[in-house]
Image (cartoon, rainbow, N blue to C red):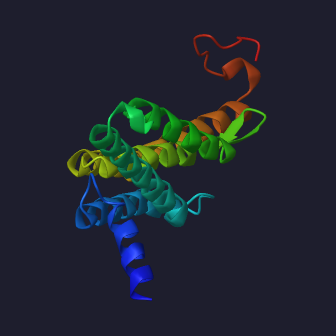
Amino acid sequence: MMDILARLWADLAASFTATAPSVAALRMIAALIMGGAIGFEREWHHKPAGLRTHMLIAVAAALFALIALEIVEISRAEGAESGARSDLVRLIGAVTSGVAFLAAGSIVTAGAHVKGLTTGAGMWLAGAVGLACGTGRIGLAALATGITLVVLWGFRRIEERLENKSALEAAEEREAPLGTRPHRPGADPMD
């Protein structure tokens, strides 16, 4: 029994050649928290992909980054004959494509209306934040998360005001008699 446990422990310890377990845990927890911060805003506004989705995307991206760092270390330690490839740029492309696939599923079009675009962008960004955390760039991930939260929370109010103003102007135009409607550049004067 002790021999089996010793083998299991050795196998587990071998998972952490490039990054110490405590550092890997810190990076994944950072991705979880920052992905959660982005997802919280989506959840708060009752969007389809919310807190858990963004957290999972960020943690998965961090894990992919940590795995890539492990592969680089294996390649470095064992040489070219190990067969391990250390192409980190491909990792970024693969994670980006995978998250883009998920994000595209959150976007719905109905006529001229598009819904879910911001949620999809948030999911894509959560993947990037996870990659940054996984590669040890937690400060960069925190900066991106902060900027994202300003955009999601702060600009929402500006966007709502613009939408309300546009709706009010459209209602006023519909109510005005045909000859008294203000002409807007590019608009059909007979409209």
Q: Is residue 68 left or right of residue 166?
A: left
Q: Nearer the viewer, residue 94 or 78?
A: 78
Q: Residue at x 36, y 78 (%)?
A: 6
Image quadrant containing the C terminus: top right
Q: Nearer the viewer, residue 13 or 60?
A: 13
- Check the image and report above or below for 66 versus 121: below
Position of residue 30 measured from the top left corner of the image (x, y, whole percent): 30, 61
Q: Nearer the viewer, residue 154 or 133?
A: 133
Position of residue 40 measured from the top left corner of the image (x, y, whole percent): 45, 64
Residue projecting furthest to the left = 139
Q: Nearer the viewer, residue 90 or 4?
A: 4
**Camera sees residue 129:** no
**Camera sees residue 63:** yes
Position of residue 116 measured from the top left corner of the image (x, y, whole percent): 62, 46
- Check the image and report above or below for 132 versus 175: below
Q: How many marks?
A: 0
Q: Is residue 112 left or right of residue 155?
A: right
Image quadrant containing the N terminus: bottom left
Residue 174: quarter of image: top right
Position of residue 125 measured from the top left corner of the image (x, y, whole percent): 44, 44
Residue projecting furthest to the bottom = 1
